[in-house]
Amino acid sequence: MTTLAAMPKYENYKNSGVDWLGEIPSCWTLFRLKVTVNGCVNGLWGQDPKGEADIVVLRVADFDRNKLNVSDDKLTYRAIPKKDLQSRILKKGDLLLEKSGGGDKTLVGCVVLFDKNYKAVTSNFVAKMTPRQCFNSSFLNYAFACLYSNKINYLSIKQTTGIQNLDSDSYLNEQFAFPLIEAQTAISNYLDEKTDEIDKVIAIKEKQIGLLKERKQIIIQKTVTQGLKPDVPMKDSGVDWIGQIPRHWEVLANRALFSERVEHGREGLPLLSVSIHSGVSSEEISDEKNVRGRVKIEDKTKYILVKKGDVAFNMMRAWQGGIGAVGTDGMVSPAYIVAKPKSTINAEYFEHQYRCPEFIQQMDRFSRGITDFRKRLYWNEFKQLYTVKPPTQEQIEIVNYIKEQTEKLESGIGLLNNQIEKLKEYKTTLINSAVTGKIKVA
């Protein structure tokens, strides 16, 4: 891709008088954002759909922040009274402003373009802005993306109880530089083409990441059920999801491998947690009362003791893969179950097996609860699950092989992720440079 430094510049520049904007082309004009749009109309949520005359209500969740437009993946239909529709119906080319929301990693104030042909309004957290005739809606969309990436919206944010609210009057009082409408159109067309090219390259790399992750899962699933020797004699495991296994391996119910550890925790031991993404964390949790939304219990006897080599799982998240091998002595929440090996085993091998999709499905079937988020896998159910058990030395060899292979795959995934981040940075810089006149693209 062409470096921005090598791209042409405008002949003459002038000081914009706006610190973050710096110099702008001499032929460009400063406007406050409020003069570029016909108002900022708040949306509404309406009533539950009635099946007749329902209308799409676009939420912040429908914002495609990468493509700066609206996603059609999961549209929401609501019943909106006719008297409330007139000033809120969206037209193709309108801009949608996020007025409430945001989070720890994202600021409220994102703007996307409504480039659809269906009838819709915005929700109560989103406002509609209609560009005036002398302003190109696509250029304005890129201009707001530039403002957002430079955090100019931060100055107009009011924080309230975890939800950020944007003072749109204050935000739209900010200044931005604009060329004539013909140049706006040419710049936005250029950016449409170039950002689409970048997005396609990113999509290819994301697909490659998906294939590497799939390859990683296949390696784990195959080795924990079939071993490392392709020519070893096989037998039917007798369990549908397991299939064929080496003849000298066993299939056992967990009660033959583990007993439940019910010892109480004690002062001085780290508090461990189980993640559905990375298993048991050996990093000690902070002494703060509330960490990541979890309330810490002061009475250490409420915790359950775990020892290196145990297997621990979150009763409420086992059906999602919240299970793992314990790498250090510590304590876990009373909401966890701790399985203590009855004989010498490699707990990491069993973690790999238990985190395979097929085994997770088995835990899901044995979990009890009315709805998904009320499901629990208790010890009495866990001990009935079937597990593949190779000889201990083979368990160790399999764990070492998985580690070696996954490190290679993770290295490739990391490289692709870095490339994606650089492409995203280039895309942002390209947009910012084009819409502020730092480079001449048309």
Image (cartoon, helix red, strand yellow):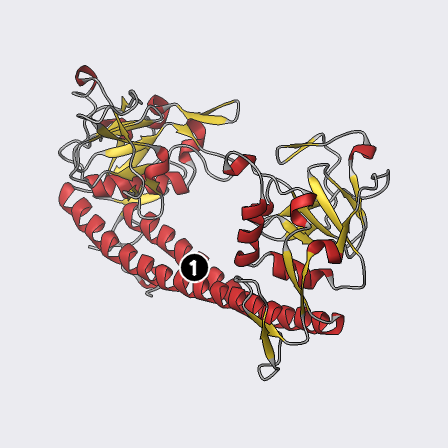
Residue type indicated by callout 1: Ile
Q: Nearer the viewer, residue 313 or 341?
A: 341
Determine which residue is flagged by label 1. Answer: 420
Residue that lies at the very extreme toward the top in this rendered image: 83
Please state, as top left, top right, bottom left or bottom right, where the N terminus lies in the image: bottom left
Q: Nearer the viewer, residue 225 or 433?
A: 225
**In the picture provided, is 387 more to the left or to the right than 85?**
right
Q: For residue 284, which quarter of the picture?
A: top right
Q: Nearer the viewer, residue 273 or 116?
A: 273
Q: For residue 243, which quarter of the picture?
A: bottom right
Q: Which of 233 and 310 is in front in this view?
A: 233
Q: Is residue 189 above or below residue 69?
A: below
The picture places residue 55, in percent across and down from the top left corner, at 21, 29
The picture places residue 90, in percent across and down from the top left corner, at 19, 30
What residue is rendered at 53% in x and 66% in y?
216
The picture places residue 210, in percent across and down from the top left corner, at 44, 62
The picture places residue 82, in percent across and down from the top left corner, at 17, 18
What residue is rendered at 58% in x and 84% in y?
231
